[in-house]
Amino acid sequence: MPQKSPPAPPNSRASRTPRLTTGAVARRLGISPTTLRSWDRRYGMGPAVRDGGRHRRWTVEDVAVLEDMCRLTTSGVSPSEAAGVALARANRSPAADPEPAPAAETRRTGGPGPGGGLPLGDIRQEFRGLARAAVRLDGPAMDELLAALVRGHGLVAAWEEVIAPTLHAVGRKWESSGDRYVEVEHLLSWHVSTVLRQVVGHARPGPRDAAPVLMACMPGEQHSLPLEALAAGLAERGLPMRMLGAAVPAEALAASVRRTGPSAVVLWSQSRRTADRTLARQVAGTAFGVRGARTRPLVVLAGPGWGGRAPGPGMLRPVGLREALDVLARHCAAVAGPLTT
């Protein structure tokens, strides 16, 4: 069992230090009180000095050790190793006889398992910290992890191997537990959107006179993050694009196609409810340009909502971010034609 420190003397400096309850510390860290108590039992991560009563009271120094452990687990370190490192840095001894946590408790509390209790499947172990940070609502940690993922592994690998699986896991958790995890999904989505827009902002702009790729979610479709990932990938490749975003009305989409004369139009649909094939055919049939040299855009049907039927004439349905980027890059190159000197 973890070694227990003796109660602080009544007039000691420690006894006069402001103390926080377990619930207050848990809210500050973004974890459950049950997880916090489990860390205390298993790893000796409790208060350095104990009051005489049964309830734990935490000082600022105690919380700093816990925050260090949270940062380590977010970076992919296992909870047991993170606890040992955090305690060593604080010159405290780890638990002499760690207590194993029951599997049911780990599933119920969302910790201290490798993905914060999310059903992550085969996601790479070193990247599970993103799930931990999301469950803790740790925005700064998510920013650091997402930026490091994109910088170190590239946008496509970061999206397909880490970001999308984590988003799907959060969505499944939310669906299976009522509204308990809706705040996790909203905050994670916001930070993912932020890093994707940073990719767009830092990319070298494409030729201003080239026909852009026009991107829009179908009317009523609010799930725009995958489309934002595609926009970031196009920006990385120096391909011009125009992003209209979520739930674009049919009239606005048609007007945008006529005004921009795009080389391709990407229509995103997350569900069959929003996959309007009649509208997609209308977009594919829209002609623009000068008389005698009028052209029509390639329509790319993106998202799971378009599944089940073959795309019509002038349409393609790629599978996944990488294939969509390759299709659009080849098409844009063909439309631009050979470079002249």
Image: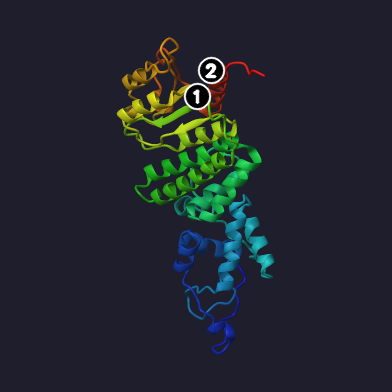
Residue in view at x 63 percent, y 57 percent: 82
Residue occupying the far bottom of the picture: 11
In the figure, 31 relative to 5: above or below? above
Residue occupying the far top of the picture: 292
Q: Quadrant of residue 267?
A: top left
Does residue 98 appear in this view? Answer: yes
In the figure, 184 relative to 236: above or below? below
> Position of 310 compared to 87: left or right?
left
Q: Disc 1 residue type? A: Ala
In the figure, 271 relative to 162: above or below? above
Disc ID at residue 276: none
Between 305 and 7, the one nearer to me in the picture: 305
Residue in view at x 51 percent, y 54 percent: 139
Neighbourhood count class around disc 2 (C-alpha, 10 Å): few under 14, some 14–19, many 20 upward: few
Q: Disc 2 residue type? A: Val
Between 158 and 1, the one nearer to me in the picture: 158
Between 212 and 34, the one nearer to me in the picture: 212
Disc ID at residue 335: 2
Q: Quadrant of the C terminus?
A: top right
Residue in view at x 59 percent, y 51 percent: 144
Q: Position of residue 119 (x, y in %)?
A: 49, 42
The local secondary structure at tag 2 comes to helix
